[in-house]
Amino acid sequence: MMELLQTLRGSGLLANPVYYTALVGGLIVLWYLFKRGASERVIWTAAIALSVLIAAFVFMFSVPPSPFQDFTRAYWGAGRGVHSGWEGLSQHYGREVFGFVNLPILAYLFAPFALLDPQPAAYVFTALGFAAMLYVWWKICALYAFDFRTRIFSLFLVAAFGPLIYSFREANTTHILLLPLVLAVSAMRNGQDLRAGALIAAAALIKPFLLLIGVVAFLRGRFRIAIGGGLVVIGTVLVSLLVFGWEAHVFWYETAIKPYSGAPLPAFNSQSIASLLSRIERGPGAYWEFTVAPLSDVLRFALYAIYAALLAALVWAIKPWTNPRASDRSFEGELMLTLLLSLIVSTLAWTHYFALALLPVAWLWRELKTQQERWALAAAYVLAAPIVFYGVRMGEGDFGPAFYVLGSHVCVAALILYALLIKTRRQLGP
């Protein structure tokens, strides 16, 4: 039995067929219970049990081999280091992709966890993340008026979503950031744009690619969102400068930001468009490369052309020349578009970043009108959802041209979602 588990762990090519079988089986069980008219208590019990089982399976066979590595290497380490001021914190920068990369002042967020040993601290952090995700799921169901059947199926599908469980296994912050983003949507609906901007900025301080949302908000005339976000970002940066000084921030930029802002990472778990092109250029052997690899001039031009096309599609969808300020419903669609765009155009986009795509998926589920569109959404989920794995055969080129789809399946799924968001936003009108 242990040998079988090790074999499955070593190759997602074996674990993922089991995953897909469990996914389909769970959906069939839930569908059967609804068809037979089972009571809500029975359906909830089955949904929770199936969700726990499939989430545990995905967690068990996802990378990394040892859980909680992002937390113990980066967040906990920075939280411990900051107890000694900049001297202690600086040691946790410059560790390539394995160190702390956030603004220095943010290390204080993790200082309380450093009062515990790494593993107990990781369990506490994971428990907080689990509570946050439960609330996010409940809040999404309320925001988008999911009926009972949709709530049940969405619970199971969220629990089975590979990028989300990967974020949990790494003990990263990505899944927790769904909380401020969902609360920002709720705040916008209540006319609290300043609060919405502040919440988006709080998430963007952890994952800077989300700053693109604030830029689009400003360009679309949602100035209170931009102001609320700007105040949070500027205030945090000023406090960080006051506490640690200018030289510390130059060191932070040089070690944590600059190396990854101009060239992609070709490794298997970076799913940006730039990383996809890097894998195409460098071949299957790049599957294991965790150092940045500048693109050739030809592919760099191709990358910029793709970016231009994606941006042009966004402008075409929102038609700013007809109405410089979108309605609340339309701007919510633009927020979803911008969120997904920020993921795929970021030079470095770890697979767990795409856990944030669950919010646009929920918005699309409510807005899509045709069965064909929902099938396209289902196809995107199927592509994005598998266990995040690494396999020796993938890096050895055994799959020929199929490698470039298999190795970038989440990126391909995100492009499908982006197309659906473009179409849906355009249909909403001004």
Image (cartoon, grey):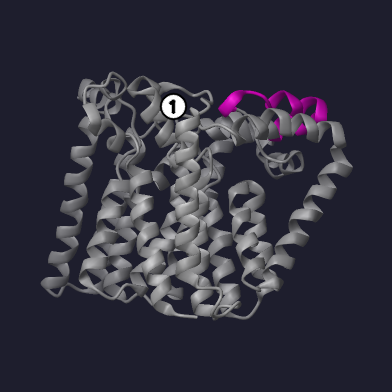
Left or right of 183 on screen, residue 360: left
Q: Where residue 85 sits in the image (x, y, percent)? A: 82, 32
**Which quarter of the figure has residue 395?**
top left
Q: Where residue 163 sits in the image (x, y, percent)? A: 40, 45
Left or right of 203 on screen, residue 287: left
Q: Is residue 87 magenta?
A: yes
Q: Where residue 250 sits in the image (x, y, percent)? A: 79, 32
Please tell me whether the stretch drawn in magenta is mainly helix, strand or loop: helix
Q: Is residue 285 magenta?
A: no
Q: Residue at x 55, y 37 (%)?
A: 122
Q: Which residues are magenta?
A: 79-98
Q: Nearer the viewer, residue 246 or 286?
A: 286
Q: Is residue 85 visible?
A: no
Left or right of 416 on screen, residue 102: right
Q: Residues within 10 Å of mark 1 (few under 14, many from 20)?
A: few
Q: Residue at x 85, y 37 (%)?
A: 244
- Residue 48 vs 331, above or below: the answer is above
**Which quarter of the figure has residue 61?**
top left
Q: Residue at x 44, y 29 (%)?
A: 266
Query: How many numbered discs?
Result: 1
The residue pinned by badge 1 equals 66
Please name the amino acid that badge 1 sits on: Ser
- Residue 323 vs 303, above or below: the answer is below
Q: Nearer the viewer, residue 291 or 248?
A: 291
**Which quarter of the figure has residue 81?**
top right
| SS for callout 1 | loop
Q: Residue at x 63, y 47 (%)?
A: 206
Q: Where residue 326 sits in the image (x, y, percent)? A: 56, 78
Q: Quadrant of the N terminus?
A: top left
Q: Is residue 45 visible?
A: yes
